[in-house]
Image (cartoon, helix red, strand yellow):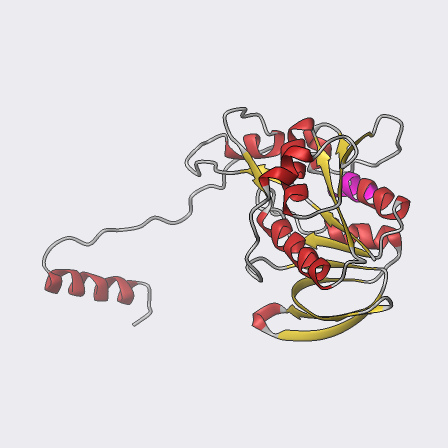
Amino acid sequence: MKILVTIKPVFEEIQMTDPDILEKNFHKQNPDLNYKINRFDDHALEEALKLKEQSNTIQIFTISVGTKQSLDILKKTIGKGADKAFLIETETKNANDPDFVSDAVKDIFMENSCDLLFCGMMSEDMMNGVTGLLTASKLSIPSLSGITFIEDISSEKIVVKRELEGGTAQKAELSLPCALNFQAGINKPGYPNVMRMLKADETSIIVKSTENTDFKNSTEINDLKLPSKTRKGEILQGSIEDKAKAFVEILKQKKIL
């Protein structure tokens, strides 16, 4: 059985007070910031690794779409236990386009005859949550989002639990091949093995160009800006009694009391 896990590099830390935060997020134009594995993708990878621990017939492939800066992140996936990684090298604006990324993931999934596609439910930076579902649609395979637990798996089917709106849990059974989009916080991702990372080379990390492909880029960014502030806080002054009276007056003004 082969599991393909999507991996998106995101900045480790961006100051939320930075007025250029969206611009830097989208174009990754800050060499001073380091990358980490997108949190949702890290949990998806951990679920794949847990399955591999249960069966020595499972192979795990990881894939990232972006610049060569993504190579360090893919080395970490090899260090965690992935068998092979693919970097689909392209400019950053394509790496943030779900249509483009899903075309790339679809190709690798088909080329390697994969059985399962594991994705994080969304990306931390762009808050994008459609790549896995779009890839499944292009592959014509079933998919589910919000996965929190894998209950059972065989060569023909997988039984999972997922979280719906309002915290409702649902149990579902899907036939293979299929795509699963995992929720965050469902496990504790392990640390990469340094020796495995050091041994990662061109045989374990394959770099592919998109120059001669017909991958689509359907996202056009017209403007990037911070949201306007519509609310403000108010600090009450005085004694506890004064603050209590002022607070009651505010509640009355808002017609809450």
Give the total number of marks visible in the rendering. 0
Q: Quadrant of the C terminus?
A: bottom left
Q: Position of residue 244 (x, y in %)?
A: 17, 65
Name which quarter of the figure residue 29 lies in: top right
Left or right? Give the position of 232 relative to 124.
left
Residue 102 is inside the magenta segment: yes
Left or right? Give the position of 242 relative to 218.
left
Q: Position of residue 35 (x, y in %)?
A: 56, 35
Judge whether 70 appears above or below 84 on screen.
above
**Residue at 77% over, 58% down:** 56
Viewer-proximal residue, 28 or 251? 28
Viewer-proximal residue, 109 or 74? 74
Left or right? Give the position of 146 relative to 231.
right
Name which quarter of the figure residue 196 lies in: top right
Residue 84 is inside the magenta segment: no
> For the stretch drawn in magenta, what is the main secondary structure?
helix
**Residue at 78% over, 73% down:** 173
Does residue 186 appear in the picture of this structure? yes
Judge whether 204 appears above or below 190 on screen.
above
Q: Which residues are magenta?
A: 98-103
Q: Position of residue 138 (x, y in %)?
A: 86, 50
Does residue 222 appear in the picture of this structure? no
Q: Position of residue 229 (x, y in %)?
A: 42, 43
**Residue at 78% over, 38% down:** 100
Viewer-proximal residue, 110 or 122? 110
Left or right? Give the position of 159 relative to 37.
right
Name which quarter of the figure residue 79 lies in: top right
Q: Quadrant of the N terminus?
A: bottom right
